[in-house]
Image (tube, rainbow, N blue to C red):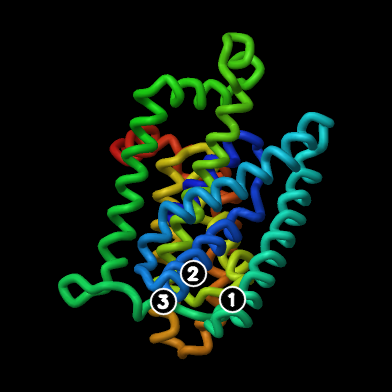
């Protein structure tokens, strides 16, 4: 969830348009992990760099061939958002075709599958339990260094804050945007690869994930990478632990209503803190709390 939220935030920073196809980029990673495991007879983890590249290229294609021409023609944000929905349908269709091809050619289950049994174990726990948090921490550190310590990071911040001014001082804004979309889509691909070791894989996984991903980014604040990680942790834990607690108290029938949790987070955040966690003036709140 953290990787997906960070990736969505990176793409939103460039176009200011929510990308509804973002979660399907993760589904691409799920199927690359399936191919690596069953067709290449390897570990799902080897699919991580491949998923990063392929999902990143698909994301850049969305920006380059669809959103960028629409922006150039002055299309509204609503039209661009609908374009991402249309692109999502195309990606889902291609994933369904790929799933059917895998079934016919290799006689492998490629719908509602899981790769849990192919994960290694460490200290009697699935290796994913250690790999996932290490991955998000590592990527957060790398992004922090890139954004704060490198010339490209300065160019990226300038391009997202004021693209016209950045262009006049010699920054290649178009290149910055493409790299941002490559990173955003690539992170989604990595997330999908890791998700295949825990969740059921299916071509239609993206639409199931997108409410949670948007909730995490909105709670964290759409303009903050660090807020995206915090929002993902908060929403993810609330979904898993909250559903488990309520199911234990009131019955397993509540599990079917798990998708309502991210929607509740979205509504509450937009009503109480539209800018998310990152937009809250925490120092002001501390001063008020001290006075109280």
**Mark 2 highlights which residue?**
35
Q: Which quarter of the figure is the C terminus placed in?
A: top left
**Mark 3 highlights which residue?**
115
Say which residue appears at 50% left-offset and 48% top-offset. Answer: 53
**Mark 1 highlights which residue?**
102
Q: Which mark is residue 82?
A: none
The crowd level at tag 2 (other Cα within 10 Å; few <14, some 14-19, many 20+) is some
Proximity of marks 2 and 1: CB atoms separated by less than 8 Å: yes
> Does residue 38 appear left or right of residue 78 in this picture?
left
- Where residue 3 appears, x then y in whole percent? 44, 52
Q: Which quarter of the figure is the N terminus placed in?
A: bottom left
Of discs 3 and 2, which sits in the foreground? 2
Say which residue appears at 44% left-offset and 76% top-offset. Answer: 38
The residue nearer to you, when weighing 42 against 220, is 42
Say which residue appears at 60% left-offset and 69% top-offset. Answer: 208
Of discs 1 and 3, which sits in the foreground? 1
Q: Is residue 223 above or below residue 163?
A: below
- Structural distance between the alpha carbons of marks 1 and 3: 16 Å
């Amino acid at each position: 969830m953290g990787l997906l939220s960070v990736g969505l935030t990176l793409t939103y920073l460039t176009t200011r348009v929510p990308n509804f196809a973002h979660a399907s980029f993760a589904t691409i990673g799920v199927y690359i992990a399936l191919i690596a495991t069953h067709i290449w007879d390897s570990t799902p983890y080897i699919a991580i760099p491949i998923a990063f590249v392929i999902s990143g290229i698909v994301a850049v294609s969305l920006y380059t061939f669809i959103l960028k021409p629409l922006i150039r023609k002055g299309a509204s944000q609503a039209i661009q958002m609908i374009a991402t929905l249309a692109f999502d349908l195309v990606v889902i269709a291609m994933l369904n075709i790929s799933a059917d091809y895998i079934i016919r050619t290799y006689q492998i289950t490629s719908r509602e599958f899981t790769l849990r049994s192919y994960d290694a174990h460490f200290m009697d726990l699935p290796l994913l339990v250690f790999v996932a948090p290490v991955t998000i921490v590592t990527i957060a550190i790398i992004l922090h260094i890139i954004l704060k310590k490198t010339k490209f990071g300065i160019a990226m911040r300038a391009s997202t804050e004021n693209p016209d001014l950045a262009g006049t001082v010699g920054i290649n804004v178009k290149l910055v945007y493409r790299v941002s979309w490559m990173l955003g889509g690539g992170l989604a691909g990595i997330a999908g690869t890791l998700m295949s070791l825990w969740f059921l894989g299916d071509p239609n996984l993206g639409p199931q994930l997108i409410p949670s991903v948007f909730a995490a980014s909105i709670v964290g604040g759409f303009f903050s990478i660090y807020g995206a990680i915090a929002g993902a942790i908060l929403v993810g834990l609330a979904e898993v632990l909250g559903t488990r607690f309520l199911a234990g108290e009131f019955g397993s029938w509540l599990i079917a209503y798990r998708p309502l949790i991210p929607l509740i987070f979205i509504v509450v955040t937009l009503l109480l803190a539209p800018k998310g966690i990152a937009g809250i003036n925490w120092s002001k709140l501390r001063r008020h709390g001290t006075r109280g």
